[in-house]
Amino acid sequence: MMNDGLKILLVDDDKVMLFLHDTFLKRSGIACDTVLCYNGREALDYLDTNQALETTFLVLLDINMPVMNGWEFLGAIRDKPYLPKVLIVMVSSATEESEKARAFAFGQVIDYQQKPLTVDTCRRIIGSDKLRGFFDNVVLK
């Protein structure tokens, strides 16, 4: 299902992960616009220049990246006017509970998933309370 009110930013410096995650999102029934960013700076620049009021941004954010990592990105958007329209899912290979706790300390973080995402984890993400309204017509098989 196409959803004009939501854009998904995939933020990861690993091109293979970006390809996989984009593929799994599509296979899970999501047909939103997907923007690929190779670091937090690219994602921040995108949000700064595309902050249309009617758009909500779902950011699938890696932690360890060059230029601007996930933690730096989270700090950089804290005072942005579009912050209420940004929902973040941390996608990381880090398994430590301290990393998850640190992520959830940021109000915009709605989930924390292990890399790589799968079709099932994508379905769980779109089924979350914060996103459910965007995907009411998606049939999860």
Image (spheres, rainbow, N blue to C red):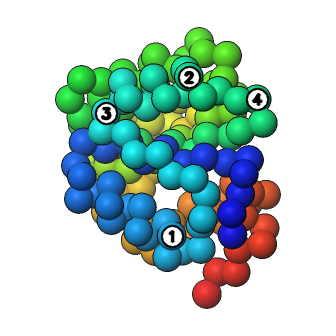
Give the residue type that dot 3 points to. Asn
* Residue at (38, 61) in percent of width and height: 21
Q: Are marks 1 and 2 in contact (CB under 8 Å)?
A: no
Which badge, 1 or 2, comes first in the chain's sequence?
Answer: 1
In contact (CB < 8 Å): disc 4 and disc 3:
no
- The answer to whether the residues at label 3 and label 1 have Cβ atoms under 8 Å apart is no
Q: Which residue is mark 2?
A: 49
Label 2 SS: helix
SS state under label 4: loop
Cβ–Cβ under 8 Å for marks 4 and 1: no
Dot label at residue 53: 4
76 sits left or right of 85 in the view: left
Amino acid identity at mark 4: Leu
Q: CA distance from mark 4 to mark 3?
A: 24 Å
- Give the quadrant of residue 127: bottom right
Q: Quadrant of the C terminus?
A: bottom right
In the picture, measured across the screen, residue 134 lies left or right of residue 80, that is right
Tag shown at residue 39: 3
